[in-house]
C-alpha cells in the first residue's frame, strides 16, 4: 500500500506478449492485479498473439516513444 502513493501519475508501465517466451506474461498479469488491489496507478498490459520479441512492432515502438516524449515534455514544463 505504501508504494501506491509513490506510483501515482502512471509512473510504471509494464508490457508483455500473451505468449511470452520466458512466461513473463504471468508476472505482468500478477503485477497488474496486485497493483489494482492496492490502488497503485500501474499500467500492466498484455498483447494478444505476441511473444517476448514480436511485441515490438513499429506501431508499439512509436506508441512507447510518444508516451516517453509526453512525459519528458511535462517534466520540462514543471522546471
Image (cartoon, rainbow, N blue to C red):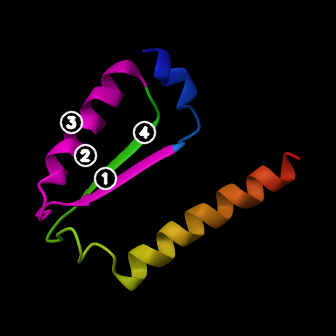
Task: Judge depth for marks 1 and 3 and give the one in front.
Answer: 3
Residue 28 image label: 2
Disc 4/disc 2 C-alpha distance (Å): 10 Å
Give SS at disc 4: strand
> Which residue is tagged 4?
42
Place of residue 31 in the rendered image (x, y in percent of width and height, measured from the top left): 28, 36
Residue drawn where x is 44% and y is 76% of the image = 61
Of labels 1 and 2, earlier in sequence is: 2
Place of residue 41 in the rendered image (x, y in percent of width and height, measured from the top left): 47, 34
Place of residue 50 in the rendered image (x, y in percent of width and height, measured from the top left): 18, 71
> Which residue is tagged 1?
45
Compared across the picture, whether 65 is left or right of 21 comes to right
- In the image, the segment drawn in magenta is 12-39
Give SS at disc 3: helix
Disc 3/disc 2 C-alpha distance (Å): 5 Å
Frontmost residue, 3 versus 43: 3
Quarter of the image holding residue 39?
top left
Q: Are marks 3 and 4 in contact (CB under 8 Å)?
A: no
> Which residue is tagged 3?
30
Disc 4/disc 1 C-alpha distance (Å): 9 Å
Amino acid at each position: 500500500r505504501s508504494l501506491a502513493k509513490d506510483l501515482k501519475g502512471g509512473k510504471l508501465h509494464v508490457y508483455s506478449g500473451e505468449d511470452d517466451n520466458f512466461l513473463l506474461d504471468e508476472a505482468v498479469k500478477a503485477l497488474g492485479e496486485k497493483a489494482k488491489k492496492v490502488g497503485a496507478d500501474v499500467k500492466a498490459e498484455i498483447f494478444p498473439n505476441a511473444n517476448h520479441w514480436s511485441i515490438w512492432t513499429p506501431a508499439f515502438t512509436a506508441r512507447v516513444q510518444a508516451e516517453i516524449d509526453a512525459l519528458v515534455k511535462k517534466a520540462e514544463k514543471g522546471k
